[in-house]
Image (tube, rainbow, N blue to C red):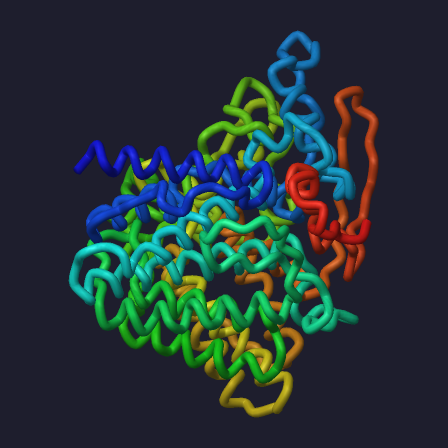
Amino acid sequence: MTKRITYLILLFSLCTCISCRKFLKETSPDEIKPETTDDLTSLMNAEAYPYQDAVNTFVDLLTDDIQSNGQGKLYNGDPDPSYLSALQNGTLVFNWDPKMFDGDPILSLGTDSYSIYYSKINGCNVVMDNLSKVSGTDQQKNAILGQTLFLRGYYYLRLVTLYSQPFNGKGIDPNVSLGVPLILSSTVTDNYPTRNTIAEVYAQVEKDLKQAAELLKANFTPSTAFRAGHVAAYSLLSRMYLYMGRDQDMDSVVTYANKVLAERSILTQLTSYLTTAGLMSDAGIYNTDRSPEVIWVSGANPTIANGYFPSQGYEKPPYTVSASLQSIYDPGTSTSNQGDLRYASYFTRWYSNGYYLNYTGKINSTAKYGTNGIRLAEVYLNRAEAYARKYIATGNATFSGNALSDLNTLRASRYDTRNTAYVPVNITDADSLFKFCQDERRRELCLEECHRWVDIKRWGLSISHHFIAADGSTTDVTLPSGSLVYALPIPFTAINRNYKLMQNPR
């Protein structure tokens, strides 16, 4: 069986390579012949799940969570040559240049998310298209179908939030504005796909995730956080409706968050990561051995050096955690009162040439555990924001109390309570409460799952970057509210493969 599965994966890879040249070039549909649900499960695990892909390594550079530091210097004052390529790789992205994806080698650094996600979508479609052709029980087939529908919904949600304008953006009509192409079958065709509307893509995501939730609840219980079950589908639905952002969507955010929290509600207590010597060495928020709030682990570990965030050397690297992100935490007043433990546990600290926080994703998120996915903290924050929005819309104080309850539940699990009890926040002004929700979301979800970039877009925020070049010269750039770059340029490799694929306005 192992040889057959290897053969299937090799054939799948060949078909994917062919499709990269012509999106889906004609080839024989009989080349891939899984025989059992075990075969399909192995194919799904290898080609539909996302764990080994270096993807979205660039997205944090687009946000205000990262700052520019120049090239860095050696102790003798000379420029550090080991950092020059990382500085150059990130320059166009950090400065929101519309041509950021127009050339190599940057696309080899995890920037070509477009092609990577469509490859995974093709994996989902291949598995689904072969379900009726293999032996196995209905429960086994429904478990596979539920997982692949969930994954396809996840990938399309990621694609539409990267390469399209926000669903509810100012001046955006989701029924007209371009989303991404919907490819729902692995059937080979000579037709080049065009872009569906934003509304059509979200409707497909909604359909996939709702069906996935039903199938997974009835047929599949994941044995590990590296596999998706119905609670992950509920969670992603709450995220999707929040991203849609209309007043009528807020009820759906609450509905699906309630479904999650009715089954799982225990947050990780960061105080439990503290010892007399400091933080435990494996105290990562995605450490599934210690962190009960992890619902699904979706990503490879970005703490591994990549083309934008290299391994730490002697000097401050080109891009690190920004001062503006650091400033919104309460770091505490002493070793006996460390305040918000996220400040102590979410980042790597360096003292060379001045104190700063290094970008490594969430600290101690090793390859074993990953550092992206879905956590209960996000579900609480989704529901809190929905309640805050409903409070603004109605003035009903019940919604204000519900939002504060969720925020305080999360924050109580994040503060050092060894010597000082957590003091709940109490905000009555509607706009102030919404702003607090925004800041709390940034504090909790920074540097994972593209959360901050999507939040900037859907809230219509304007942010600024101060760029320091290798020669020390500086440039101040601003991403205005509603910028065209909210819809990232589709990489030139995809445009070259498909003449019908319309590029985003620049």
Residue 34 position within the rendered picture, expressed as x and y whole percent measured from the top left: 26, 46
The answer to whether residue 70 is above or below residue 261 is above
Residue 333 in sight from this viewpoint: no
Q: Position of residue 337 (x, y in %)?
A: 41, 51
Q: Say if residue 12 shows up in the picture.
A: yes
Please say if 342 is above or below 393. above
Residue 413 sits in which quadrant?
bottom left
Relative image position of residue 466 (x, y in whole percent): 77, 39
Q: Is residue 25 left or right of residue 303?
A: right
Q: Is residue 439 left or right of residue 405?
A: right
Where is residue 323, by image quadrant? top right
Residue at image point 19% right, 66% down? 139
501 left or right, relative to 119: right
Q: Nearer the viewer, residue 136 or 216?
A: 136
291, 372: nearer the viewer? 372
For image coordinates 66% across by 58% down, the residue present is: 195
Q: Nearer the viewer, residue 117 or 183?
A: 183
Q: Residue at x 72, y 66 (%)?
A: 177
Q: Residue at x 42, y 81 (%)?
A: 255
Q: Position of residue 107 (x, y in %)?
A: 61, 33
